[in-house]
Image (cartoon, coloured by chain):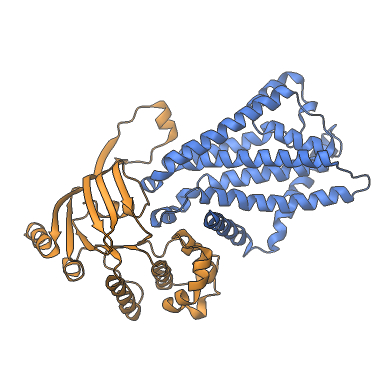
Chain colours: A blue, B orange
Amino acid sequence: MQDYFNFLWVMTSKEIKARYKNAFLGFLWIFLNPLFQMLVIGFIFQKIIKTPIRHYFSFLFAGLLAWNFFAYSFTKATPAFVWERTLIKKARFPREAIPLSIVFANFFHFLASFLLFFIFLLAWPGGHISWLGTATIIMAILWIVLFTIGATLLSSALNVKYRDVNFFIQALLILWFYATPVIYSLNILPPVYLPLFQFNPLAYPFALLHHSLVATPLPPASILWTNLGLSFLIIVLGILVFRRESKFFADWL
Amino acid sequence: MNNIAIQLTNLSKQYSLHHEKPTLAEKLFSRTRKEKIWALKDISLTIMAGEKIGIVGSNGSGKTTLLSIIAGITEPTRGQAIVNGRVAALIGLEAGFHPELTGEENIYLNGMLLGMSRREIKAKLKQIIAFAELEKFIDVPLHAYSNGMKMRLGFSIAIAADPDILLIDEALSVGDQAFQKKSRQAIEHFFRQGKTIILVSHYPTTIQKLCPRAIWLENGQIKAIGKSRQVISQYQKTSHA
């Protein structure tokens, strides 16, 4: 068991190290990337479109960090087995280490920049986040991480057999970004559209994250339960499909 | 030691043959005919611990599939494979390295892929580096390595795993002549150590020299099994007639 976690750790640190080894500014990129995104999107919505959301830059930054974690993990892990085919055909090892190490490496990046952001929020004049708020943030992040793990297990396993899954995921992610409350909050939408968000398992955790950071109102509980159910379904499906398919990955690569 | 190392019971492996890569869209919206081939058909075989056994057979006879199943890289479609002990397959030696990481970082990565623990690798690190003769390059990222250097490193890690069961596919030619000699000696050392060894080779003479017992695979089935001299003379009669 300890060997298993050591192995996962070595795979994860490989991901982390390899990503910034040759990059100019190195580690700083994990923070700079969402910062530039925030400045551009924030400028558009704050100055041009005049969003009614208060503390919009903070609102945006938190959402972008979480979204980037999900999107980077999903994009990179889905085709991972095809890239690592020589590894799969070389030895027997727990196959899930490949997508999990990608998710964990991205989570590490997310956590580093989120902590910086959190400290910045607290240091800001009038900045205050209660213990309950902090606990809610942790819950929201945990939800997003578990969902990401389930989704990447599912997509990476399916992509071994069906190579168009990767193209489908790349197209889906672009639409998914706009279907998730990252740059907007659900309370500014006309209420007729709210039921649609029951089908996006990321809607509630993002709203929860925003709520505990910048006090945007929470969406109705119906979205909570359907999102929670759908997330659970995808996580279970991901684990089951992965367990069934991973035995035969070598046959398809 | 009179234990069973490998026990295969009614082992069969089926592959789906695809002329193009299947797509999910196709799977959902149309019924495509699937061609299936049996790479292995109903193989039953017991290999005792310490036995040295050779496998001969033409291309596509199922040799590599059999090794993959024993190594746990893939699973049989039907039947059962019980393998007792740590297996190392001397295949894909140059695979499993990350180009951006240094030699030492890659030793940990690759060693753990082969089932070694971190502590075990740490203890064997010097030995691995020395055997691969890469002392000067160990802090250099792998993209600076030549193919021969990667093969040497892969070979050193694989043998450092100190497997109970060693699977060798084809004649090994790792690195330059000096290293080839060294790697052959390392393998011969394994032969003397009482390890279980399965050797797949196109060169029947190698098998006859090193393995008392041999199997002849043809179309996924065992065509002959027994003393390697007899099996190989049978094999040579038909294939080189």
Q: Looking at the image, which is closer to me, B96 or A72?
A: B96
View extreme (front): residue: B1
Image: B205 above or below A75: below
Image: B66 above or below B209: above
Residue at 70%, 43% (x, y): give it: A66
- Residue A248 in view of the camera: yes
Q: Looking at the image, which is closer to me, A226 or B37?
A: A226
Image: B130 above or below A177: below
Q: Position of residue A54 (x, y in %)?
A: 86, 36
In the picture, the quarter occupied by the N terminus of chain B is: bottom left
In the picture, the quarter occupied by the C terminus of chain B is: bottom left
Q: Position of residue A43 (x, y in %)?
A: 81, 42
Residue at 43%, 71% (x, y): give it: B153
View extreme (top): residue: A192
Q: Position of residue B25 (x, y in %)?
A: 44, 31
- A140 left or right of A154 in image: right
> In the picture, residue B166 is in which quadrant?
bottom left
- B218 left or right of B173 in image: left
Q: Looking at the image, which is closer to me, B215 or A184?
A: B215
Label count reads: 0
- Residue A41 in view of the camera: no
